[in-house]
């Protein structure tokens, strides 16, 4: 199993969640976050905004679903037509164990 963490623009959140749902990924956690990327935020005039609002989507998937899930997120989250700074990042990590609290069962 793999955990995907996608940090995306807040205005793209609904579009990405809809695409994931339509692709069969219904179990997703959404968390509002702030941060900055390599460009160190945005400077407008004399003001630098170094903590930009983003949404983090977290989901656990089967290993064999990785490429499809990532492409689904990228297509829905990318700014048109070729993408732009601040569109986000996707992180993939291994999940060693998972448990369902209500049933007290191990899922992997």
Image (cartoon, grey):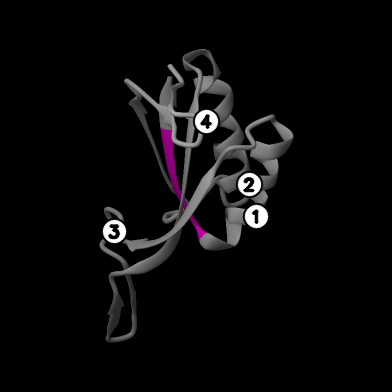
The span shown in magenta is 4-9
Q: Quadrant of residue 25?
A: top right
The mark nearer the N terminus, 2 or 4, is 2
Magenta span contains residue 10: no
Q: Name the element at disc 3.
A: loop
Judging by the rendered image, the residue that carries numbered circle 3 is 39
Point 61% across, 39% down: residue: 75
The kind of secondary structure element at disc 4 is helix
Instruction: Classify residue 74 by image quadrant.
Output: top right
Distance in Å between CA atoms under marks 4 and 3: 23 Å
- Name the residue at 28% across, 70% down: 50
Check if mark 4's residue and mark 3's residue have beta carbons within 8 Å: no
Q: Is residue 85 left or right of residue 75?
A: left
Q: Residues within 10 Å of mark 4 (few under 14, many from 20)?
A: some
Residue assigned mark 1:
14
Report the Cα–Cα distance between label 2 and label 3.
27 Å
- Residue 30 appearing in the image: yes
Crowding at dot 1, Cα within 10 Å, few <14 / some 14-19 / many 20+, comes out as few
**Residue 79 locus on image (x, y percent):** 57, 52
Estimate the x, y position of residue 11 in percent, counting from the top left: 58, 62
Q: Quadrant of the N terminus?
A: top left
Mark 2 nearby-residue class (10 Å; few <14, some 14–19, many ≥20): many
Q: Secondary structure at mark 2?
A: helix
Q: Which residue is mark 4?
A: 70
Indicate which disc, 2 or 3, sits on the residue closer to the N terminus: 2
**Residue 56 at x, y percent in the picture:** 44, 51
**Mark toward the start of the polypeptide (4 vs 3):** 3
CA gap, disc 2 to disc 4? 13 Å
For marks 1 and 3 on the same chain, the one whose residue lies earlier in the sequence = 1
Tags 2 and 1 in contact by the CB under 8 Å rule?
yes
Which residue is the extreme one toward the top? 64
């Amino acid at each position: 199993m793999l955990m995907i963490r996608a940090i995306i623009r807040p205005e793209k959140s609904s579009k990405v969640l809809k695409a994931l749902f339509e692709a069969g990924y219904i179990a997703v956690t959404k968390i509002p976050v702030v941060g900055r990327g390599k460009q160190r935020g945005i400077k407008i005039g004399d003001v630098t905004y170094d903590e930009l609002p983003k949404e983090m989507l977290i989901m656990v998937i089967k290993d064999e679903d990785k490429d499809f899930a990532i492409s689904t997120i990228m297509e829905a989250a990318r700014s048109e037509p070729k993408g732009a700074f601040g569109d986000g990042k996707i992180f993939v990590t291994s999940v060693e164990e998972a448990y369902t609290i209500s049933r007290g069962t191990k899922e992997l």
